[in-house]
Image (cartoon, rainbow, N blue to C red):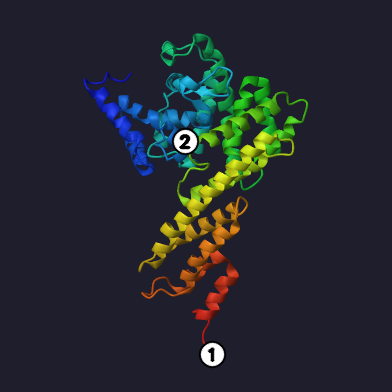
Amino acid sequence: MAAPAPPGSEDVLRTLRRQIIEADDEQVRRVVATVDALASRGSIDRLLGPLRPRLEDLRPPRRLHFARLLFLPLDPLIVAPSRWRRDDPTLPRALIPPVTRLVEAGLPDGGAAVRQTIRGHTTADTEAISSAGAGLWQAASDTLAKATLPPRWADTGLAARHFAPLMHQIATLLAQAPAIDRMVFETANGLLPPDRFAIEAMARTVTMTCPDALPMLTIMLLRRLPQSAGLLYKLASNRSMIGLKAAAEGAADLLLHRLEASRSVVAHQDLPVFSAAVRQMAAFLAEIDHAATSRSRREQVRELRQRLDQDCQTVFTSGLTRDFLPPLQAPAAPVERLEEVARSLRVLEAEARTLGNAAVYQDQLTEAVAALETPPPHGGLALHDRVRLLELLAGPERALALLEREGDPLTPEL
């Protein structure tokens, strides 16, 4: 239990919260990193309360600790206690401390091995999450399935009658978390289609084990694997999959509502991360815009696609003018970083072309291509590096033309 705040600290916290609310995105990221690094956060943790909607937009990497790893699969379901309703497919944030204590008590070492495995890692370290998470989520499921009301349950503000159904839902969902994680890996984060039979097996298991958790499962699937939406709709046409159609529609409605309420459709992160997220989001919007969708949802999807297109243009311009062109002109240009940026720009352009005006991106790439085709006055990049970057941005034919024009250094003159 956190120590009581010293006199006057509430005034200090109120002042800090006001300043944080007014902070820009980069300042918010620094605040989150600082708070996450504290060994004991106590009342300081309350500083992050007003930031949670912005953190949902920014999604900065967070320090990976036991409770965060435990609830990571359930993250899209977590809402503030004031927003939780018993019949909604969500979970109140107040559950995190008591559930964490129950799971720790159910592990032979109290979670020490898990903490050792994830020490120094963040939510961006997918390998560490998969390695430590699979065993933890299954063990937690087993523990929570037979848990009894803990002594401090009243601290959550939830009635005692809510304990058993909530534990049943969480246990059911955590049992499926390793399979979802494996599916994300097997599809290369959505580049390959998900396994229909694996999704069907998950949906049937949850339907038989805890039907109330089926809408929550669909939210988890759509958040991690947007391409699964089409499969869920097809499975829902099977009469034996009772409740799946309503669950899929409810999950889509909830996720669309959250997107509408956010400042940006996709978090403005590193260019490679953003490009991958755009692919996922574009796939989600395409999947839920099926033949039988309502007119109101089609309008929602259309507006969100327009917003996503604007986000893509903003990030593409920023990546080109900040991360590519200035370093390209530097005397000691970082070749590996430039290749990564060029590859990400091309991926983003390919995804964004399906959303809006392709000419916008082509016009901007013209400047980058011209910079690569014109040797810098100070020497700069070697010819083979410029050719490689040009191939990534404009294709092999343009790169070959540059090589032929300036002379292939690997071809001896006759």
Q: Residue at x 51, y 62 (%)?
A: 364
Q: Residue at x 25, y 27 (%)?
A: 12
Local SS, label 1: loop
Where does the image place residue 199, in percent across and percent down from the top left? 67, 34
Q: Which residue is mark 2?
A: 56
Between 155 and 376, the residue placed more toward the observer is: 376
State which quarter of the image contains the N terminus.
top left
Where does the image place residue 33, in percent across and percent down from the top left? 35, 38
Q: Which residue is mark 1?
A: 414
Would you identify the image quadrant in which residue 321 lies? bottom left
Residue at the outermost left position: 7
Where does the image place residue 221, in percent across and percent down from the top left? 61, 34
Between 293 and 331, the residue placed more toward the observer is: 293
The label on residue 172 is none
Amino acid at dot 1: Leu
Specify few, some or many for label 2: CA neighbours under 10 Å numbering under 14, 14-19, or 20 or more.
Answer: some
Specify few, some or many for label 1: CA neighbours under 10 Å numbering under 14, 14-19, or 20 or more.
Answer: few
Amino acid at dot 2: Glu
Q: Residue at x 37, y 30 (%)?
A: 48
